Amino acid sequence: MRKTAKEAMKTRECILQHALKVFGKQGFAATKLTDVAKEAGITRGAIYHHFNNKIDLFHELAEKYRTKITNHLEQIYGKNLAPISKLKKLLKGYFELLETDEGLGEFEKLHLLKLEITNLYDTDCKKVQSFFQNNLQLISKLIQEGINNGDVKKDINPEEFAWFLFAYVGGILRLWTFFDRPFILSEKGSKYIDMFLDEQLLVG
């Protein structure tokens, strides 16, 4: 019997969830679609019905979590807050999302620690670049607004600081994932964000 669209979507989501689990255990390069099929309890043919190969699988996982992050951050950005308070809220909101969304946390771990050098991003490069550029521009804009209203030091270059902040947050995440979540990210990570931004950005 032919599956309904709802059933097909459920199977596709099941494949994605189990693929993430296997990628996390074995690393992307070592994983075969037969491994994913076994983990999901389906045939390899069922996977090929939805995905051409494991690179397609990874790209859909990446798009899924990019969209989830973007939607979450857009909700925070819409709040009526002062620029730097909003920036802090965005970063802390990202940390909270990583902790509460198990799939996103596992994808971040895969991305940071178990994604071997491959041609994974060759066909997805523009989407990845756009995702990061949009977030860099958002951070730069908030910093410039903070300069304009007198909260942020006038000698700060918003574009340069946005890159610096990305590297700082990336370092916190790498420690958190590498040492298997040794601290509560939403608590200690948020404390680090406050300390860093208050020291580096704020006037007086």
Image (spheres, helix red, strand yellow):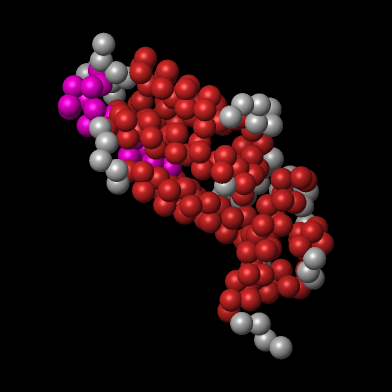
User: x, y (%) of residue 7?
Assistant: 63, 76
Horizontal arrangement in the rendering, residue 194 relative to residue 2 (left or right)? left
Horizontal arrangement in the rendering, residue 75 relative to residue 68 (left or right)? left
- Write down the region rendered in magenta: 132-153
**Whether residue 185 is visible:** yes
Quadrant of image for the C terminus = top left
Q: Which one is nearer the viewer's eye here, 164 or 192?
A: 192
- Number of numbered labels in the structure image: 0
Q: Which one is nearer the viewer's eye here, 117 or 73?
A: 73
Quadrant of image for the N terminus = bottom right
Residue located 47% across and 22% down the image: 191
Residue located 67% across and 63% down the image: 14
Residue with the most extreme left position? 149
Residue with the most extreme bottom position? 1
Horizontal arrangement in the rendering, residue 38 relative to residue 177 (left or right)? right
**Whether residue 133 is visible:** no
Residue located 79% across and 59% down the image: 39
Question: Is 136 included in the stretch rendered in magenta?
Answer: yes
Question: Is 16 included in the stretch rendered in magenta?
Answer: no
Residue with the most extreme top position? 204
Q: Is residue 15 above or below residue 101?
A: below
User: x, y (%) of residue 182?
Assistant: 66, 26
Secondary structure that dominates the magenta span? helix
User: x, y (%) of residue 22?
Assistant: 75, 51
Residue located 58% across and 79% down the image: 5
User: x, y (%) of residue 114?
Assistant: 69, 40
Q: Is residue 164 above or below residue 126?
A: above
Q: Which one is nearer the viewer's eye here, 192 or 62?
A: 192
